[in-house]
Amino acid sequence: MNTQYSVKMRAAKDKDHRLGGKHISGAERIVDEAQLEEVCKSMVRRALCHPKGKADFINITIQNLEGKSVQYIEALDISEPHVTNRIETLEYVEKVLNTFKIDTRVLEKLQSIQDMRGAMLLDAYTLERLDGLDQRGVRVSTMDYNKELDIEGYLLKYGFTGKYVKDAIALSSKVASAPGVLLELCWSDDPLYTTGYIAGKSIGYIRLNHFKPIQHQSGGRIILVDTHVVKVDVLVEYLQNQAVIINSYPLMVEAK
Ligand code: WAQ
Ligand code: MG
C-alpha cells in the first residue's frame, strides 16, 4: 500500500492566524505520496484566489501517516424531513432530542454560541461543557473521502453544489463514528445559510432547511457525549487526530 499523508492548509490575511489575522481559507486532505505535490499546488492556488481575499499567510502542514492507523468508515445517510419553517424544524429537533433523553435546552446553548472555531463538547445528560477549550472548542480534523469516490459528482445529482454539504457530511460522519458520541447539532457561520443538521450514528445526517435563524451571525456546533462510554481526552484525540477515510457515498433516504 502507498504511504499516505495528511495535508492541512490554512490561509490568513494581514497577519498569521496566531496573531489574529483574518481567516481566508482552510482545507485538508489525506492523499498518497504521488498526489502530494499536486494537492499542495491546488491549495496554494485556492488561498491566493479566494473570494474572501488574497491570502498573505499560507500555512501548509504535511504529515506522513505511515505507521499510524487509518480508519475507514461509511458516510452517514442523508434525510430531509418535510418541515417548512423554523417552528416546525425546532419541533422536529425537539422530538429527536426527546428520544435520546436530551434536554431541549441544548438548542439555547447552540444559539448562544458566538464565533467559535471548533465544536463544544457537552455531556449529553447534564449539558455540562466537557472540553474546557473555551472559544476554540474541538476542531474535528484529519478526515477525507476515498479518492476513488466522485463525491462532488454524486452530490450534484441531488442538487447539492458547493462545499457545505460535502464538508459537513465528512465531518459529521467522523463525529458519529467516534465512541460515546450520541448526537451532533450544527449550523453554518454564513448569515444567509439557514440549513443545518442534527446527526448521529443511529439517525444519520438529518438536513434541516430552516434550522438557523435568518441573519444570525454565528455558526455553531455541539457534540453530545455519553461520558459513561468514553473518556473526554480519548474522544478529543480521536476527533482531532485519528486519520479517517470515508469509504462510501452518503445514501439519500426517506425521512422518518
Ligand atoms: N471542527 C469542529 N467545529 C467546527 C469545524 C471543525 N473542523 N469547522 C467549523 N466548526 C464549527 C464552528 O463553530 C463554526 O462556526 C460552525 O461549526 C459552523 O461551521 O446544506 O457550513 O463550516 O447540508 O460554517 C451545515 C449544512 C453547514 C450543510 C455547516 O459549517 C448542508 C457549515 P461551518
Ligand atoms: Mg462556514
Image: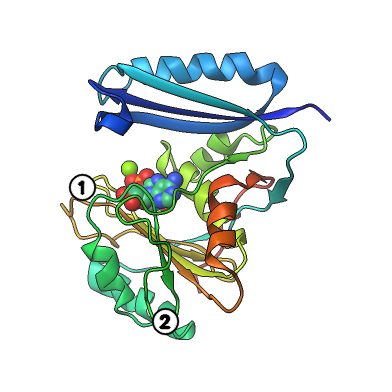
Front residue of 46 and 235: 235
Task: Write down the residue under mark 1.
Answer: 191
Which residue is more in the foreground, 63 or 7? 63
Label 2 or label 1, whichever comes before in sequence order: 2
Q: Residue visible at 32% across and 32% down?
A: 18
Q: Is 204 located above or below residue 3 in the figure? A: below
Residue 43 percent location from the top left of the image: 47, 20
Which residue shows up at 79% across the image and 26% down it? Answer: 2
Residue 127 x, y percent position in the rendering: 37, 76
* Residue indicated by mark 2: 102
The answer to whether the beta carbon of the residue marked 1 is less than 8 Å from any atom of ligand 2 is no
Question: Label 1's element?
Answer: loop
Give percent across and percent down for residue 254: 53, 66
Question: Does the rendering let one see residue 188?
Answer: no
- Structural distance between the alpha carbons of marks 2 and 1: 27 Å
Q: Quarter holding the N terminus?
A: top right
Q: Is residue 243 above or below residue 35?
A: below
Residue farthest to the right, as pictured? 1
Q: For marks 2 and 1, give the one nearer the viewer.
A: 2
Instruction: Identify the image quadrant of residue 159.
Output: top left
The colouring scheme, among rainbow, by chain, secondary structure or one colour, is rainbow
In the rendered view, does 225 fall on the left or right side of 250? left
Q: Within 10 Å of the Cα at label 1, are there few (<14), some (14-19), or many (20+) other Cα atoms?
A: some
- Amino acid marked by disc 2: Ile
| Disc 2: residue Cβ within 8 A of ligand 1's nearest atom | no
At numbered mark 2, what does the secondary structure look like: helix, strand or loop? Answer: loop
Percent position of residue 147, x then y: 66, 32
Instruction: Tell me if residue 209 can be seen.
Output: yes
Res. 134 image quadrant: bottom left
Nearer to me, 92 or 114 = 114
Which amino acid, mark 1? Answer: Pro
Please tell me the numbered disc located at residue 38: none
